[in-house]
Amino acid sequence: MNKCTPGPWEIDGPMTGPRCAKTYQIEGTFITGARYKDSPSASPVVCVIPETEESAVGDEQYRKGDAQLIAAAPDMYEALKYARRFMKKEDVDVEYIDKAIAKAEGTAQQEEKDE
């Protein structure tokens, strides 16, 4: 698996201000000794979900929902890997679960090419 920012990830937002109105930011866990763009002590930014000029009227609910789903990703990935250890192919159709894990690990496209 490719490396990613360690979880847990937290939501910061909606932010306010002229340049970041209603923007959600997902932040990861600070890694001791790591340096980030503007500050040696700031949490790394994983993702920014901005409000844009093209945003729909009800878009705020989608940006917030997207932020919540993205922030939960590390926890869901670990929970799915843990649960998968207890599943047997003959008991449960695990192909869907295996594909989701492969997608998170960046190996899904490689597995499709190999088939």
Image: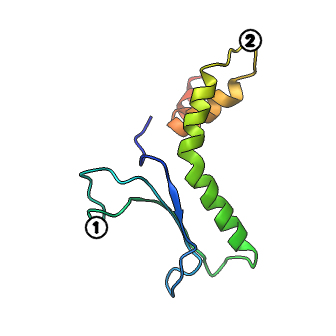
Rendered view: 62 above or below 52: above
Please indicate whether residue 37 sits to the left or right of residue 77 in the image.
left
Q: Where's the C terminus, which quadrant?
A: top right
Residue 21 is situated, as x and y percent measured from the top left of the image, at 56, 81
| SS of the residue under disc 2 | loop
Q: Identify residue type, mark 1.
A: Ser
Structural crowding at the residue carrying mark 2, measured as other residues with C-alpha within 10 Å and reported as few (<14), some (14–19) or many (≥20): few
Q: Distance between the residues labelled 1 and 2?
A: 51 Å
Q: Which of marks 1 and 2 is in front?
A: 1
Residue 91, picture quadrant: top right
Which of the labelled discs sits on residue 90, or is there none? 2
Q: Identify residue type, mark 2.
A: Glu
The residue pinned by badge 1 equals: 39
Please indicate whether residue 49 sits to the left or right of residue 33 in the image.
right
Residue 11, picture quadrant: bottom right
Rendered view: 11 above or below 21: above
